[in-house]
Image (spheres, rainbow, N blue to C red):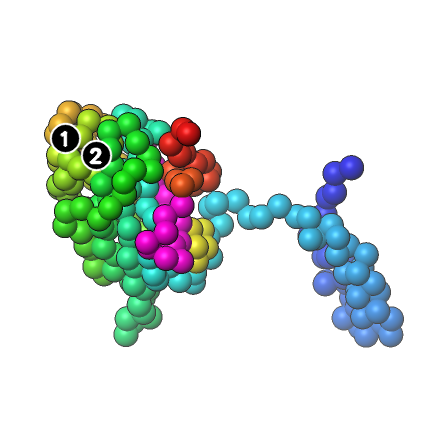
Amino acid sequence: MSRSFSVLGLLPLLVSPVVLGGCPDSEAKFNEFLDNTKDDRDFMPPPPPDVMPAQADISGDFLLAVSTVIAPDLPMQFIATNTMTVDENGDTLLDTCLQPLSLMQGKVNMPREPIGDPLCYEGIPIVEGKFDVDAGEVNVTGEANPVTGGEIVATLKMIGSIIDENFYCGDIEGDVSSPLVADLKGSTFAAVRLEDPAMLPLDVTKNCSGDTIRDME
C-alpha cells in the first residue's frame, strides 16, 4: 500500500490561534501527530535533483565521466581533484583539475591510467549549488578517447549542480572540431566521490539520473 504525507497537515498546528493561545495539551497533540506520521515521513521520496544543498562540500577526488551524444556508452573519464573555498566576500569558489584517464577504444574500464596533462580551472563561483565551467578550447590526448582513439579538440562548457558532498553532475555544451566535427548539445557528465583514486569503480555513472555503464564480461 502506498504511503502519502503532506506538509499541509502541519499547517493547522503551526498557525492555529488555539495553539498560539497556549492550549494546555497542544504540544502533546503535536508530538502525537509527529509520532503517528513518522513512518510516512521516513518514506517520503528524496528531493528532486533541482533542489540542491548549496553548502555541500565537494572538495576531494572524484571519478568524472563525460558521456557525449556521439557515443554515450563510451564516456571519457577523469580524476577530478576539487578544492572549495569561501572568499572574503562570503562567495563560495571551486578550483578543479581534471586528470584524463587512458581508455582503449570501445572500453569503459581499461586501463584507466593517468595520461596527459590535467585540465585545471580556478575561482569558479558556486551559487545555490550550481556552477558553470567555461573551459574554452581543450585538447585531450587520443589515448583518453575510447571512441576513435584520436586526439580531441573541443570548445566546451560544463553546466553543473551539486547533489550532495559525494555526487555532482550536469550537462555539456559546445563543439568538437577534431577528430570529427560534432555538436555536443545533449551530452552529460557525472562525478562520484572516490575514497581512493587508485581504486576506481567498475560501474561508471554518466548522468544526473545515476545511469551507469561498465565493460561487458
For the magenta stretch, what is the residue range?
184-201
- Residue 206 % position (x, y): 38, 38
**Of residues 128 and 211, which is closer to you in this image?**
211
Does residue 140 appear to the left or right of 199 in the view shown? left
Does residue 121 appear to the left or right of 36 in the view shown? left
Quadrant of the image for the C terminus?
top left
**Of residues 110 and 189, which is closer to you in this image?**
110
Q: Which residue is mark 1?
A: 150
Among all residues in the image, which is located at the extreme front?
217
**Overall secondary structure of the magenta stretch?**
loop
Answer few, some or many: residues within 10 Å of disc 2's Cα (few below 14, many 20 plus, some between 14 and 19): many
Q: Which residue is mark 2?
A: 145
- Residue 178 % position (x, y): 12, 29
> Residue at 29% of width from left, 37% of height from top?
110
- Is there any visible trace of residue 127 in the rendered image? no
Question: Is residue 122 highlighted in magenta?
Answer: no
Q: Earlier in the sequence, mark 1 or mark 2?
A: 2
